[in-house]
Image (cartoon, rainbow, N blue to C red):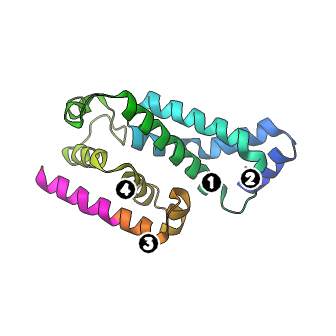
């Protein structure tokens, strides 16, 4: 399979545009979907947000100048669209966090494992309690194993800000798990 850069050049030169885009999507769609799903928890919602992300990528790929890695740009768009979705859901929702906790069992786990262990369930509940930015930074670092420079680029913050968000998230997760 061609590199991201080669595929982007093909797309931008209108040379087998659909094929180049399809290959980019095949390379990255699973990671994008899982990153979104970790934030929104619901499969259908994650699928909807991922579709919006790929439509935006199609619309904006002609203007991508390759000043950063494609994956960084892609995750930044996914991050922004996920935050937009969460904000819309918050506006639509009138239920409190306490009411939402009662329906936690209806959400699939972060790992999609058929049987989650008790610690996995506690971790998922703890992650769900984090503010969006801390949750996203934690998941990029912990699950995707990205470095702080890439996280800072995706989230539009400084390296120090990314580190601070990650460490605050860890501290809150530890406190939540100790309390349960």
Sooner in the amino-acid sequence: mark 4 or mark 2 = 2
User: Which residue: 24% across, 58% down?
Assistant: 172
Q: Is residue 70 left or right of residue 109?
A: right
Callout 4–callout 2 Cβ contact below 8 Å:
no
Sooner in the amino-acid sequence: mark 1 or mark 4 = 1
Callout 1–callout 2 Cβ contact below 8 Å:
yes
**Circle 3 is placed at which residue position?**
160
Sooner in the amino-acid sequence: mark 3 or mark 4 = 4
Looking at this rendering, what residue extends furthest in the bottom direction?
160
User: Which residue: 54% across, 57% down?
Assistant: 154
Q: What x and y, as percent, mark residue 86?
A: 42, 38
Mark number for residue 64?
Answer: 2
Residue neighbourhood size for the residue with mark 3, other residues' Cα within 10 Å, grouped as few (<14), some (14–19), many (≥20): few
Q: What x and y, as percent, mark residue 37?
A: 43, 39
Q: Which secondary structure lies at badge 3?
A: helix
Segment colored magenta = 167-179
Q: Which secondary structure lies at badge 4?
A: helix
Structural distance between the alpha carbons of marks 3 and 4: 13 Å
Query: As displayed, is residue 112 above or below residue 180?
Result: above
Structural distance between the alpha carbons of marks 2 and 3: 27 Å
Q: Is residue 118 left or right of residue 106?
A: left
Q: Nearer the viewer, residue 75 or 16?
A: 75
């Amino acid at each position: 399979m061609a590199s991201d850069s080669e595929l982007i050049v093909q797309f931008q030169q209108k040379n087998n545009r659909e094929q180049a885009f399809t290959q980019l999507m095949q390379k990255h769609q699973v990671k994008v979907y899982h990153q979104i799903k970790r934030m929104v928890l619901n499969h259908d919602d994650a699928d909807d947000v991922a579709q919006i992300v790929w439509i935006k990528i199609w619309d904006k790929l002609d203007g991508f100048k390759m000043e950063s890695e494609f994956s960084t740009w892609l995750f930044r768009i996914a991050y922004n669209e996920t935050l937009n979705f969460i904000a819309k859901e918050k506006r639509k929702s009138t239920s409190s966090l306490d009411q939402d906790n009662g329906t936690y069992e209806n959400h699939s786990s972060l790992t999609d494992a058929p049987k989650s262990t008790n610690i996995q369930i506690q971790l998922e509940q703890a992650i769900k309690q984090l503010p969006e930015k801390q949750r996203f930074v934690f998941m990029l670092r912990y699950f995707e194993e990205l470095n702080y420079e890439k996280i800072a680029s995706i989230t539009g913050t400084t390296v120090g800000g990314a580190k601070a968000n990650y460490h605050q998230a860890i501290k809150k997760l530890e406190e939540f798990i100790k309390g349960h």
